[in-house]
Image (spheres, rainbow, N blue to C red):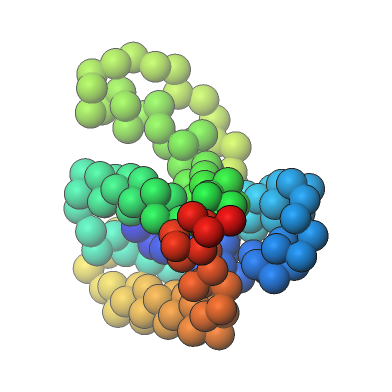
Amino acid sequence: MNVIFHTTTAVGVAILLTDTKRIEQARTLKDTIWTSILAFIVGVISHGALDYIPHCYPINSKLDVFAGLAMILITVWLTNKKYQFIMGLSFLGSIFPDLVDLSPSIINKQLGFNLPILDKIFPWHLHDYSGSNYTNDCSNSFLNHLLLLLTISIILWCRQTDLRAIFNKKYDKNN
């Protein structure tokens, strides 16, 4: 899937896993670190699930990378300081498989470098396990993208209290 879909999922993962009330009550770094590590792991797993389901690429790859990077930077910047590490590791986990498996070949192609291309580590990047669809029939892909966005929207709606706490900069300044 496109980077934008992976990063959108990362926001959902971070909101889903972050119990702001527990972190506030405990006031320990341990809870934040544990949630951050879990967000990274779930981000990697979600990446695999998204790459495994059938999908086309509805967004131009160059635009996708720049928009995805902008989304990551802006979202982490808007996140309350207490939760930036959780949000950051969720983003990193969601794009980590692509950074490891695909970055060298993309850098070689775009910048004319000659970085070594190693075998893929993540199985969903292998042809047999990838859901990438390069045919002209993307109707199934459209439905999968729509279901993903609907799922993330439901998570954000159900976790409104945590969503507000994570992005409330006023709250951060008062503590």
Q: Residue furthest top?
A: 114
Q: Quadrant of the C terminus?
A: bottom right
Residue 56: x %, y % from top left: 32, 64
Where is residue 90? Give x, y as percent.
56, 52
Q: Is residue 155 above or below residue 41?
A: below
Quadrant showing the N terminus: bottom left
Q: Residue 100: where, in percent of width, then height?
A: 51, 34
Q: Position of residue 146 (x, y in %)?
A: 36, 79
Rendered position, 118 above or below 7: above
User: In the image, is 67 to the left or to the right of 144?
Assistant: left
Of 50 and 66, which appears nearest the observer? Answer: 66
All told, the count of numbered labels is: 0
Please state which of residues 145 and 85 is positioned toward the viewer in this rendering: 85
Can residue 112 be seen by looking at this rendering?
yes
Q: Nearer the viewer, residue 31 or 119?
A: 31
Image quadrant where residue 161 sits? bottom right
Q: Quadrant of residue 57?
A: bottom left
Seen in the image, is 114 located left or right of residue 33? left
Pick whichever, 90 or 47, lies toward us: 90
- Relative to residue 116, is residue 134 drawn left or right? left
Left or right of 29, for residue 128: left
Residue 34 in view, yes or no:
no
From this viewpoint, which residue is outermost toward the front?
Answer: 174
At 26% from the left and 51% from the top, the residue drawn is: 67
Query: Which residue shows up at 52% across the image and 80% down it?
Result: 160
Q: Residue at x 23, y 22 (%)?
A: 111
